[in-house]
Amino acid sequence: MCGRLNVIDDPGVRELCEGLQIQLFPESQIFSRFIRATNQVSIVRQRDRVHRMDNAIWWLLLEQTATGFKPSKYTSFNTRYDKLNFKGTAGYQAYRHSRCVIPAKGFGETEYVNNKPLHYHDLVAKDGAILLGGLCREETIKSSV
């Protein structure tokens, strides 16, 4: 799966969000053509029957520190679908109780050979935008409102 997200302020992304009745918060929404795992990303989830956008760290397993949350040592920015139904896996509870989507213009993947980046593959929506499904943990999300 993707190793970076392309979330730009784009008419296609705005149109997709408006069509899904997602209220955007441009003053706090995170835009970047290159959002990597462990970076902040704007996510959309349903709270009290309203689709709302909040910011979260793109990493499911987070550890509490004196200054906030930080990514754990366990890789958890992508979850395999075939592990979602096994108790004890990182995504088991979140899949059942706390899903989100990420509106994006596209995503990218880096191809490595001998631990060195060889190719950067950027997949971008030609017209419009895409929604990526995600898992989140409520206690680690920074609310926009």
Image (cartoon, helix red, strand yellow):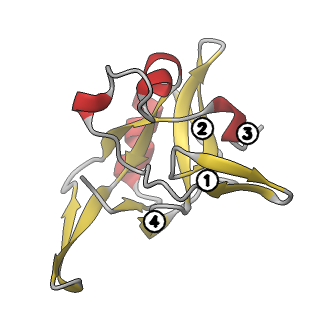
N-terminal-most mark, 3 or 4: 4
* Position above or below: 94 against 102: above
Q: Does dot 4 land on a helix, a strand or a loop? A: strand
- Residue on which the image places disc 1: 29
Q: Kindly report the distance in space between the C-alpha atoms of the residues bearing marks 2 and 4.
A: 17 Å
Mark carried by residue 143 = 3
N-terminal-most mark, 3 or 2: 2
In the foreground, 105 or 86: 86
N-terminal-most mark, 2 or 4: 4
Residue depicted at 55% across the width and 45% down the height:
61
Q: Kindly report the distance in space between the C-alpha atoms of the residues bearing marks 3 and 4.
A: 19 Å
- Residue on which the image places disc 2: 53
Q: Does dot 1 land on a helix, a strand or a loop? A: loop
57 on left or right of 6: right
Amino acid type of the residue tagged 3 in the rendering: Ser
Position in image of residue 12 (x %, y %): 34, 49
Q: Quadrant of residue 88?
A: top left
Q: Kindly report the distance in space between the C-alpha atoms of the residues bearing marks 3 and 2.
A: 8 Å
Q: Are marks 1 and 4 in contact (CB under 8 Å)?
A: no
Q: Quadrant of residue 70?
A: bottom right
In the foreground, 8 or 80: 80
Residue 57 visible in the displayed image: yes
Mark carried by residue 35 = 4
Q: Does dot 3 land on a helix, a strand or a loop? A: loop
Q: Residues within 10 Å of mark 1 (few under 14, many from 20)?
A: some
Q: Residues within 10 Å of mark 3 (few under 14, many from 20)?
A: few
